[in-house]
Amino acid sequence: MSEEIRKELEEIAPRLARLQRPEDVPPVEGNYFHNLRVDVLQNYRERLTHPKSRRESSGWWSFLSLPKRPAMAIAFASVAMLLVTVFWLWPAQVEEDAFAELKTDEIYAYIEENIDDFEVELLMQSGLTTHGSLFEDVDEDGLEDYLMDDIQQWDEDDWEDIL
């Protein structure tokens, strides 16, 4: 390499200028590239005459080579996405309400028979009862006597909790 070229290369690309050609590079034969062309053409002609030899694999595992064939991969992904979308958007079967056939009188009768199993707040939230309807059958004098007896049994801790 001439000195002028080396100086110019040093200015443009200093790293490239420092690289040196390895000395152990094997020489290339004069007809190497000609023989390479002949070998490639011969290989191409063999593939044209024997197309089955091109197939590398066949069987159930050949679907793993889909990324090598983009059209097949896109088709497979489209079908998979379509199936997922159909099953996701398919309307779910609505189960019939078990209480739809019951009449209101039957529901009230059941609640009245099993009133001790329900919480008062739950009954009031459902609208099935109100404060007034809970105490319709209560004798006021009996209730007052019950409350007075209960209050007389309270001790100091009970009164402190209330007050």
Image (spheres, grey):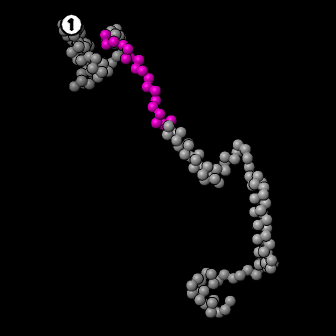
Task: Please identify the quarter of the rendering in which residue 146 is found.
Answer: top left
The kind of secondary structure element at disc 1 is loop
Q: Is residue 88 above or below residue 28?
A: above
Work out whether residue 26 or residue 122 is closer to the camera in this orientation and state it.
26
Q: Is residue 98 magenta?
A: yes
The total number of labels drawn is: 1
Tell me if 108 is positioned left or right of 73 in this view.
left
The correct choice, above or below, for 133 with respect to 14 in the image is above
**Is residue 1 among the parts visible in the rendering?**
yes
Extreme residue in the front direction: 49
Q: Position of residue 113 (x, y in %)?
A: 34, 8
Q: Main secondary structure of the magenta part?
A: loop
Q: Is residue 11 above or below residue 77?
A: below
Seen at 31% across and 10% down, the residue is 105
Residue labelled with disc 1: 139
> In terms of depth relative to the viewer, which is nearer, 152 or 67?
67
**Which of the image's four quarters has the C terminus?**
top left
Extent of the magenta region? 87-105
Q: Does residue 112 appear in this view?
A: no
Q: Which residue type does callout 1 highlight?
A: Asp
Residue 151 left/right relative to 115: left
What residue is at 37 percent from the left and 17 percent from the top?
100
Name the residue rendered at 46%, 27% in the picture. 93
Residue 95, position as x, y percentages in the image:
44, 23
Q: Position of residue 14 (x, y in %)?
A: 59, 83
Magenta span has 12?
no
Residue 22: x %, y % from top left:
73, 80
Neighbour tally class for label 1: few under 14, some 14-19, many 20 plus, Cα within 10 Å = few
State the image quarter where residue 21 is shown.
Answer: bottom right
Q: Point out the image quarter for the N terminus.
A: bottom right
